[in-house]
Amino acid sequence: MGFWSLFMVASMPNLQFLLVALLGAFLASGYGSILSTNALRDMNKIVFVVFSPALVFASIAETVTLQDILSWWFMPINIGITFLIGGMLGWLVVKILKPEHHLEGLVIASCSAGNLGNLLLIIIPAICSEDGNPFGESSECKTIGLSYVSFSMALAGFFIWSHTYSLMRKSSVLYEQIHGENGTIKFPQNDSETSGEDQNQYKQGYGDQEALILPSKKPTDRAAEHQIIAPLLSKGEGSKNKAHLWMSLKATLHRIAEEFLAPPTIAAIFGLVIGIIPWLKSLIIGATAPLRVIEDTISLLGDGLIPCVTLILGGNLTPGVHGSAVKPAVVVAIIGVRYVILPLFGIAVVKAAGELGFLPPSPLFEYVLLIQFTLPPAMAIGTMAQLFDVGKEECSVIFLWTYLVAALALTVWSTIFMLILS
């Protein structure tokens, strides 16, 4: 097929997504005045707790089997590579452009976490529906494609609600530590024991949280105190160090457990369990299943995810039109990472995996792996910004420009990927 024929095939799903997002932006604007800030926040919570877990569970439990998971073993590695490379590039963007410290997590998250679920649910079926698609007959393409997308969505849930969730939560904690209730930066009380140099360091707002804790004693006082305490530590230092390591380990495990208890992640786990256990799957999934009403109900709830999150995305883009404190260079850098550098890495990674025999003989599977490197930032980042109340306006600006550019970038790269695979 020619370039322009594939270009038309690739443009249809992006136009559908853009139209629904524009509707959401209109409803949130002064002309619509339906999706207010409170309404968006409430919708985000419903999506997070109800719609997203329902769709993840229904897609995984219905379409993924143990044999599929074994043959698709490279997909989690591929997604991990996208997060790794994107995170490293985001870290470089943060170090070079130096955005505000409470926005560093947002920048890294925008570079590393792509929209691996919701957007693919629109792109893949829409491409399969086009007559000129290079992946075969429409219905078979949709069925297989949805299996790939469902597995991608489940894996994305593990990465996003652990790595990205942690980044955004730390940004929220940092924001609360360095800003007062009225939006002004909190400084420690001036006293005779705090040096001017320490005050200046505090006002500079160092990135790591340890820098926010100022010494409360003079150097001479601390030295004298250390001389008194040192002999006591020397006797029980080993036991105290062990106790400290144990407490640190417990705290770390507790944080990991909290992050993996996010509703979409729990739903993905249950979906995988049901999908890989045949007798349990036959009990719930299928037209003759005794408990098929459970699947029907969950699927009905899951069907509301795509329109809701797309409308929310459009509503979240509206504040970005008015601008915010985020630097234009940061937005340009994120666009460059997501739509220039990452797709090039993706071609190299997927072609190398194919040459080494790591991939099943499916051009559609390779296409899904390639497109995972080319997606705009995950919508879950906006949900997290709403939940943690940090960087909402900056997130709107980033989403505005990255999703506007995505309409063109995804079309161009999709065309290139299909040319490579056809």
Image (cartoon, helix red, strand yellow):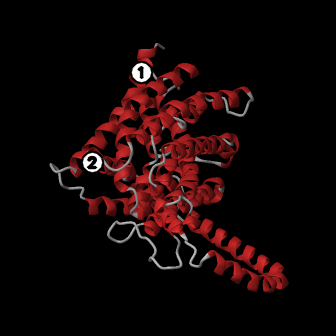
Residue located 46% across and 74% down the image: 188
Q: Residue 126: image x %, image y %?
A: 41, 33
Q: Residue 197: image x %, image y %?
A: 53, 65
Q: Is residue 282 visible?
A: no
Label 1 sits on a secondary structure element that is helix
Query: Nearest the camera: 138 or 45?
Result: 45
Answer with mark 2 or mark 1, whichever residue precedes in sequence: 1
Q: Residue 179: image x %, image y %?
A: 40, 67
Task: Specify whether 29 is left or right of 260.
Answer: left
Label 2 sits on a secondary structure element that is helix
Quarter-wise, where is residue 239 in the image? bottom right
Task: Specify whether 371 is left or right of 27.
Answer: right
Q: Which residue is mark 2?
A: 318
Q: Residue 219: image x %, image y %?
A: 64, 75
Residue located 38% across and 33% down the image: 405
Residue located 46% across and 69% down the image: 177
Q: Which residue is the extreme one toward the left?
A: 31
Q: Which amino acid type is marked by label 2?
A: Thr
Q: Which mark is residue 151?
A: none
Quarter-wise, where is residue 125 in the image? top left
Position of the C terminus, as image quadrant, is top right
Q: Residues within 10 Å of mark 2 (few under 14, many from 20)?
A: many
Q: Residues within 10 Å of mark 1 (few under 14, many from 20)?
A: some
Figure check: 312 above or below 214:
above
Viewer-side label of 2, 1: 2
Q: Which mark is residue 7?
A: 1
Figure check: 315 above or below 191:
above
Query: Nearest the camera: 413 or 51?
Result: 413
Q: Which amino acid type is marked by label 1?
A: Phe
Question: How far apart in space, not on screen, are marks 2 and 1 (Cα)?
Answer: 29 Å
